Image (tube, helix red, strand yellow):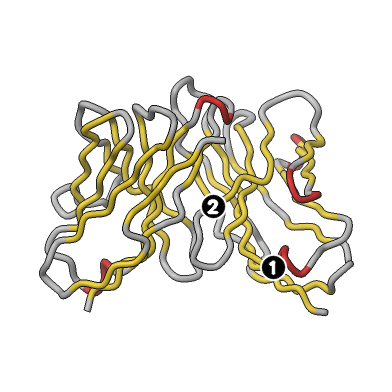
């Protein structure tokens, strides 16, 4: 079965600093990969996704992620964070089975932004 | 874009009562919907896959008689927590694949926070 690991439970960065959130997955093949963001008490919003092709994907809100097959990683980056980026971030994998869209989520990384 | 609406957003109930949570796809049809459960400061755990017109598929360890799922139309799935107990208190989130979001992309509802007293 597939699994997702987000090794950082909580990260604190200063506003304007760069950010990298780590995500590693375990799966027999290349899965579909996603990053979602969750604000307190809210549902999840899709930041970006990787299905195939260019391994560097651009998302909303200035986020990007790079798929590295050799490392089974899909780390999320942002060059300069804003206070509004404070939230919980989830990496997720989906199976490459037609019509099967269920996702397996990592444990999440809580991002705190300090002035 | 595709929107998934959940209702209620918050519900408090007494132990032993049943609570129904609705999940609606707005402006798109969803033959499949997914119900997740999220404990405080933890990840989302898939509970079940709701299938329009047929029985839901439950993940291992999820009691189907406890968490009743009905997917009666192409835009509505409901989750009923029966005989709720305090340990059922959680954040329940539904999601659906929306065609205009691309294959295998789920749109999530805003979640329903259940508190059982």
Q: Chain of mark 2?
A: A
Q: Nearer the viewer, residue B101 or A54?
A: B101
Instruction: Please indicate whether residue B50 sits to the left or right of residue B91 in the image.
Output: left
Q: Nearer the viewer, residue B68 or B30?
A: B30
Classify mark 1: helix, strand or loop. loop
- Residue B34 x, y percent position in the rendering: 38, 41
Residue, far front: B27
Residue located beneath label 2 in the image: A44
Classify mark 2: helix, strand or loop. strand
- Residue B26 x, y percent position in the rendering: 42, 37
Q: Judge the density around disc 1: few (<14), some (14-19), many (≥20) Cα neighbours within 10 Å.
A: many
- Please identify the quadrant where the C terminus of chain A is shown: bottom right
Residue located beneath label 1 in the image: A86
Of the residues under marks 1 and 2, which one precedes in the sequence? Answer: 2
Which residue is pictured at 55% across the width and 59% down the height? A107
- Residue B18 x, y percent position in the rendering: 14, 61
Asked if labels 2 and 1 touch by Cβ distance under 8 angstroms, the answer is no
């Amino acid at each position: 079965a597939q699994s997702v690991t987000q090794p950082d439970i909580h990260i604190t960065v200063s506003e304007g600093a760069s950010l990298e959130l780590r995500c590693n997955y375990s799966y027999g093949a290349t899965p579909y990969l996603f990053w979602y963001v969750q604000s307190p008490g809210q549902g999840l919003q899709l930041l970006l996704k990787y299905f195939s092709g260019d391994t560097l994907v651009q998302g909303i809100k200035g986020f990007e992620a790079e798929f590295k097959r050799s490392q089974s990683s899909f780390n999320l980056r942002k060059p300069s964070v804003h206070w509004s980026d404070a939230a919980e971030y989830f990496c997720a994998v989906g199976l490459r089975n037609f019509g099967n869209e269920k996702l397996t989520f990592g444990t999440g990384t809580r991002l705190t932004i300090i002035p | 874009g595709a929107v998934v609406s959940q209702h209620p957003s918050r519900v408090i109930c007494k132990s032993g009562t049943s609570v129904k949570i609705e999940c609606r796809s707005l402006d798109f049809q969803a033959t499949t919907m997914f119900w997740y459960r999220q404990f405080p400061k933890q990840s989302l755990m898939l509970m079940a896959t709701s299938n329009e017109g047929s029985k839901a598929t439950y993940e291992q360890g999820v009691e189907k008689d406890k968490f009743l799922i009905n997917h009666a139309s192409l835009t509505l799935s409901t989750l009923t927590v029966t005989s709720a107990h305090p340990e059922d208190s959680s954040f329940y989130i539904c999601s659906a694949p929306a065609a205009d979001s691309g294959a295998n992309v789920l749109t999530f509802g805003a979640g329903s926070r259940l508190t059982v007293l």
